[in-house]
């Protein structure tokens, strides 16, 4: 507010100076007019003297010479008056231009003063409407004579020795004002529904937080269930492997008399990811890897593993598809002996082309084609067997 008043006083002083200059110009014009009058009187006096001289000369030289002199004098006077008139007109035009310029300057100053006054009134009204503070109180409490508080960015830690207030410097505060206005422009217009939107978003955030907590709890429960299932699977697998390995060690010598078979875990410390290796050593051989055995020996070893699984975990019935196709008569006898033991507690369904396997069956089922029509036939070999 003080700066505006100083500027108004400066403009008023300048207007007064211009008015004094105009007054001085008017006084100068009056002096010029007086000088013109005096010059005219002097010219009249000179003309009178000249007339007297001409008259005296005319007497001496005659009327003709006097007339010529009078004409020449009249021409000279007219030229002089024309020159003086032109000079006076030039001075008048110059003064008129200066007066117009001063008038324009004075008008602009008056307009500037009016605009300045309106701006001050607008600022006073704005201070009352937006801040609710009287302009005098605002200037007294927040004027340039007061120190400006130092604003610390929220993301930065204040320095221990940093000042909390600095003296008012107009250039610095104008820069801060411009930066604040840019930041305010980036924020956009004020949203009157911001509080309602905030409450809605807060409610949604609360809902999502609860859902996230439920998901985390569900995830923990699922992980616990998975851990329990893994533990149960590991326990069941370990028990099944022990029983199957024990049965395999019993079944293998029956199919390979004098031989030795064993099941070995590839990763005993990790029962969920471990594999199973079958070590088979027929009688008279030192090899244990299945890839080094013959085709019949590999088939018989696989049958031994299958029978070991059946005996470790019995089932009401078993389905086998040509498991004895690659066996010779001796090995087939051994396998049929095992099948006879299995059928005492379970029902066996065997797909085979071996007659000797069919001989131990209780019932036979076959598929035949007659005249292009497929038909299923059955034959009971023992009457006490239900078909």
Image (cartoon, helix red, strand yellow):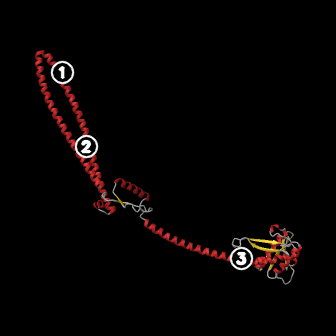
Residue beneath the point at 13% across and 25% down: 47
Q: CA distance from mark 1 to mark 3?
A: 152 Å
Marks 3, 2: nearer the viewer: 3
The Cα–Cα distance between marks 1 and 2, rounded to whole angstroms, is 46 Å
4 w.r.t. 58: above or below: below
Q: Position of residue 221 (x, y in %)?
A: 59, 75
Q: Nearer the viewer, residue 29 or 182?
A: 182
Q: Residues within 10 Å of mark 3 (few under 14, many from 20)?
A: some
Q: For the residue carrying disc 1, how many other residues have a C-alpha within 10 Å: few (<14), some (14-19), or many (20+)?
A: few
Tell me if residue 59 comes above or below residue 155 in the rendering: above
Q: Is residue 287 left or right of residue 99?
A: right
Q: Which comes before the other along the chain, label 1 or label 2?
A: 1
Q: What whole-number distance in Å separates the C-alpha atoms at marks 3 and 2?
A: 113 Å
**Residue 185: horizontal and vertical position, in percent?**
42, 57
Percent of width and height locating residue 294? 84, 68
Give residue 68's position: percent from left, percent from top: 16, 18
Identify the mark at residue 72; answer none if there is no mark: 1
N-terminal of the pair, mark 3 or mark 2, is 2
Secondary structure of the residue carrying numbered label 1? helix
| Residue 133, quarter of the rendered image | bottom left
- Horizontal side of residue 272 vs 28, given as left or right: right
Query: Label 2, on which residue?
Result: 103
Q: Is residue 378 visible?
A: no
| Residue annotated with mark 3 | 238
Horizontal placement of 5 versus 42: left or right?
right
User: What secondary structure is found at the residue carrying circle 2?
Assistant: helix
Q: Nearer the viewer, mark 1 or mark 3?
A: 3
Q: Report the residue at 18% width, 21% height from top.
A: 72
Q: Which residue is located at x 45 percent, y 67 percent?
A: 198
């Amino acid at each position: 507010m003080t700066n505006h008043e100083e500027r108004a006083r400066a403009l008023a002083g300048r207007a007064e100076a211009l008015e004094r200059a105009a007054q001085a110009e008017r006084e100068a014009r009056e002096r010029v007019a007086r000088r013109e009058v005096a010059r005219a009187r002097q010219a009249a006096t000179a003309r009178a003297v000249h007339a007297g001289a001409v008259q005296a000369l005319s007497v001496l030289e005659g009327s003709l010479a006097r007339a010529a002199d009078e004409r020449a004098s009249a021409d000279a006077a007219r030229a002089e008056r024309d020159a003086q008139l032109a000079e006076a007109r030039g001075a008048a035009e110059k003064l008129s231009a200066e007066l117009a310029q001063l008038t324009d300057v004075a008008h602009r100053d008056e307009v500037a003063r009016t605009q300045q006054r309106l701006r001050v009134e607008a600022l006073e009204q704005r201070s009352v409407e937006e801040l609710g503070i009287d302009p005098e109180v605002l200037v007294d409490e927040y004027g340039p004579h007061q120190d400006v508080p130092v604003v610390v960015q929220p993301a930065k830690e204040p320095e221990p020795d940093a000042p909390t207030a600095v003296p008012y410097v107009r250039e610095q505060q104008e820069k801060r004002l411009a930066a604040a206005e840019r930041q305010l422009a980036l924020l956009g217009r004020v949203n009157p529904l911001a509080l309602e939107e905030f409450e809605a978003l807060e409610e949604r955030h609360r809902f999502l937080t609860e859902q996230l907590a439920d998901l985390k709890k569900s995830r923990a429960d699922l992980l616990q269930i998975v851990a329990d299932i893994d533990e149960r699977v590991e326990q069941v697998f370990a028990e099944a492997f022990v029983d199957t390995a024990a049965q395999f060690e019993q079944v293998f010598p029956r199919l390979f008399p004098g031989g030795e078979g064993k099941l070995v875990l590839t990763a005993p410390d990790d029962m969920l990811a471990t594999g199973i290796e079958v070590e088979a050593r027929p009688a008279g051989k030192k090899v244990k890897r299945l890839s080094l055995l013959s085709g019949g020996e590999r088939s018989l070893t696989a049958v031994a593993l299958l029978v070991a699984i059946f005996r470790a975990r019995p089932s009401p019935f078993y389905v086998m598809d040509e498991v004895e196709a690659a066996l010779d008569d001796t090995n087939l006898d051994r396998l049929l002996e095992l099948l006879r033991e299995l059928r005492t507690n379970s029902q066996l369904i065997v797909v085979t082309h071996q007659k000797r396997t069919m001989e131990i069956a209780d019932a036979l089922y076959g598929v035949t084609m007659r005249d292009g029509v497929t038909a299923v036939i059955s034959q009971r070999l023992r009457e006490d067997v239900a078909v």
